[in-house]
Image (spheres, helix red, strand yellow):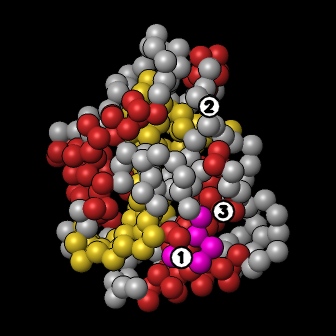
Amino acid sequence: MPDQFALTDSAAQLILTHTALRPQIALVLGSGLGGFADSLTDATRIPYADIPAFPRSTAIGHAGRLVIGHAGSVPVAAMQGRVHLYEGYSPQEVTFPVRVFGRMGIRAVILTNAAGGINLSYSQGALVLIRDHINLQGVNPLVGPNDDRFGVRFPDMTHAYAKEYRQIAREEAAKLGIPQHEGVYAGLLGPSYETPAEIEYLRRIGADLVGMSTVAEVIAARHMGIKVLAISCVTNMAAGILDQPLSHAEVMETGERVKTTFEALLRAVLPRMN
């Protein structure tokens, strides 16, 4: 079996040879949200295909490249698209980019995603800070022999989502006039959307949002000591809430509609995290 630590180290070193920037913060931009990376200045763009062992995104709305540049005065590394378990990737492959970030010296990551709204107080297009998650994907990226070079065998997940970063995001959202929401994200395997009965189950166990990403990346990040801020865009209300079918086109359309607001929040938050 390949040495994952060596593979991530090799990928990190190749990325760093492409740019003089040494970002401390990385962003993972989900479905319909990758436009933020296009606005970075002094940017270097590296297709995932050019990075050794880096998984390639196949999902619609995921450009599949790493962009390193400045968001204002803050150097960042931004993933335009991620890979998912439902694409057939293993948990280790899904979390490989986060591992690479850790080897690049990244100490904080902002994860974004498109999610279905379960909490009835959310509206389509709402931005929700994730305060906790429920892992229902049936897998964990830390299964198997633990590599102590990444982190400890049993990492604590009590504060998986950094409270201080959520506070910063709440303060900046208030200044921008963005309605504030926090919630619990349920991560499911996908790719089929959930049934109304499954959504009712998720509501009863405390989930406010549902999606098919993020959870494995957060676990891997915390394993390496990387702090996490995660923001969901509620691109659709979950099954059974509205009497209409769910579609990925709706996800993309909502992402486009809230793009300006989302990017304004990211730009306000980044300098305070740096």
The answer to which of 70 and 154 lies nearer the viewer is 70
Magenta stretch in the rendered image: 50-55
In the figure, 158 relative to 95: above or below?
A: above
Please identify, in this view, whether the residue under mark 1 or under mark 3 is nearer the observer: 1
Q: Which numbered tag is attached to residue 93?
A: 3
Q: Secondary structure at mark 3?
A: helix
The answer to which image quadrant residue 256 occupies is top left
Mark 1 → mark 3, Cα distance in angstroms: 13 Å
Marked residue nearer the N-terminal end (2 or 1): 1
| Residue neighbourhood size for the residue with mark 1, other residues' Cα within 10 Å, grouped as few (<14), some (14–19), many (≥20) | some
| Residue indicated by mark 1 | 51
| Residue neighbourhood size for the residue with mark 2, other residues' Cα within 10 Å, grouped as few (<14), some (14–19), many (≥20) | few
Residue 56 place in picture, x, y as percent: 56, 62
Residue 123 place in picture, x, y as percent: 34, 25
Marked residue nearer the N-terminal end (2 or 3): 3
| Farthest top residue in view | 243
Instruction: Name the image quarter holding the N terminus.
Output: bottom right
User: Can residue 160 be seen here?
Assistant: no
Q: Secondary structure at mark 1?
A: loop
Residue 161 place in picture, x, y as percent: 50, 53
Residue that appears at 66% across and 75% down: 150
Indicate the amino acid at tag 3. Answer: Glu
Marked residue nearer the N-terminal end (1 or 3): 1
In the figure, 62 relative to 9: above or below?
A: above
Residue that appears at 38% across and 22% down: 121
Indicate the amino acid at tag 2. Answer: Ser
Instruction: Name the image quarter holding the C terminus.
Output: bottom left
Indicate the amino acid at tag 1. Answer: Ile
User: Can residue 91 be seen here?
Assistant: yes
